[in-house]
């Protein structure tokens, strides 16, 4: 097995499409076996991972369901072995300004973006402790620092995920587990292209230093680095990969 992640098992939530799918493919290309938890079928991701020669497990899982995510963790352990890498990528985006967000919508946004990361981390923590080189990578958003008006619930949830990342890094350092976040900008995925106007993509590019639309590979490369031994001394950080739009 070749690659920086050879012999390791990586779990990606929300890995059936978009950013999560590209993360799964990229981690597999570096030698990791891949497990995907998603509410949608991950057949396409399965094919991409198969092309790398790595093993794959994909299950339909609601990550806001505590029992379901623990059952999934048991299946991963049985079929692929103990997890070494957890990528909390699953997310929902609600486009509505504050006055039009209902309490149910607010709670759903936090349930997937924040509770899902909490529950997945709880479920896989025993494996990550045993790994000796456990990695938790949370996919957050640079919109936390430059929030567009109609994203109040999404930006608030990603802000909570940033805080979770920071505190968890301190909590788990004694177990040689690193915890980091990757804050992306507006990434062109099939879902984003279908729900976002070209004008908004163009507006985003205008405020970036790098004058092109961000693609999933721009996120997966950072995730792969953080999952590797090259990042063994990096923890509690939010790596902003947004083409310089925030220039933090």
Image (cartoon, rainbow, N blue to C red):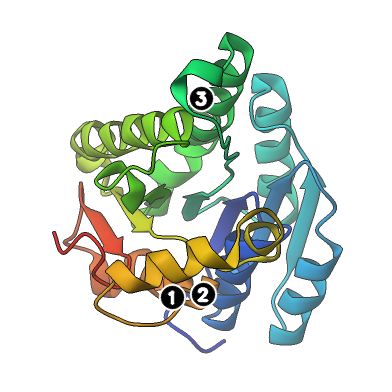
The residues tagged by marks 1 and 2 sit, at their Cα atoms, a distance apart of 6 Å
Choose the circle earlier in sequence order: 1 or 3.
Answer: 3
Query: Is 228 left or right of 32, judged from the image as shown?
Result: left
Residue at 29% x, 38% y is 162
Residue at 24% x, 45% y is 145
Q: Mark 3 points at which residue?
A: 110
x then y, percent, for residue 117: 49, 35
Corner quadrant of residue 204: bottom left
Corner quadrant of residue 231: bottom left
In the picture, which quadrant includes the N terminus?
A: bottom right
Task: Say if 146 sits above or below 72 in the image.
Answer: below
Q: What element carries label 3?
A: helix
Q: Can residue 187 be seen in this view?
A: no
Q: Are marks 1 and 2 in contact (CB under 8 Å)?
A: yes
Residue at 51% x, 34% y is 113
The foreground one among 95 and 178 is 95
x then y, percent, for residue 31: 55, 79
Choose the circle earlier in sequence order: 3 or 2.
Answer: 3
Q: Mark 1 points at which residue?
A: 218
Q: Can residue 221 be seen in this view?
A: yes
Q: What crowding class fits label 2: few (fewer than 14 Cα within 10 Å), some (14-19), or many (20 or more)?
A: some
Query: Residue placed farthest to the bottom in the image?
Result: 2
Query: Is 162 left or right of 116, judged from the image as shown?
Result: left
x then y, percent, for residue 84: 47, 55
Q: Residue 215 carries which label?
A: 2
The foreground one among 213 and 27 is 213
The residues tagged by marks 1 and 3 sit, at their Cα atoms, a distance apart of 25 Å
x then y, percent, for residue 164: 31, 32
């Amino acid at each position: 097995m070749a690659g920086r992640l050879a012999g390791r098992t990586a779990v990606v939530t929300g890995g059936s499409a978009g950013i999560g799918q590209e993360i799964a493919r990229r981690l597999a290309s570096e030698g990791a076996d891949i497990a995907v938890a998603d509410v949608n079928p991950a057949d396409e991701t399965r094919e991409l991972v198969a092309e790398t020669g790595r093993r794959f497990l994909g299950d339909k899982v609601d990550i806001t369901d505590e029992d379901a995510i623990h059952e999934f963790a048991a299946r991963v352990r049985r079929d692929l072995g103990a997890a070494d890498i957890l990528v909390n990528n699953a997310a929902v985006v609600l486009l509505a300004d504050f006055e039009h967000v209902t309490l149910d919508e607010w709670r759903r946004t936090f349930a997937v973006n924040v509770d899902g990361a909490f529950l997945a981390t709880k479920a896989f923590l025993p494996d990550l402790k045993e790994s000796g080189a456990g990695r938790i990578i949370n996919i957050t958003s640079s919109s936390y620092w430059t929030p567009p008006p109609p994203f109040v619930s999404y930006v608030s949830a990603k802000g909570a995920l940033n805080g979770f990342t920071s505190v968890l890094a301190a909590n788990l350092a004694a177990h040689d587990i690193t915890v980091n976040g990757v804050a992306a900008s507006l990434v062109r995925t099939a879902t984003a292209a279908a729900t976002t106007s070209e004008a908004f993509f163009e507006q985003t590019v205008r405020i970036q230093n790098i004058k092109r639309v961000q693609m999933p590979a721009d996120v997966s490369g950072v995730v792969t680095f953080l999952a590797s031994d090259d990042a063994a001394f990096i923890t509690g950080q939010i790596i902003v990969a947004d083409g310089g739009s925030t220039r933090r």
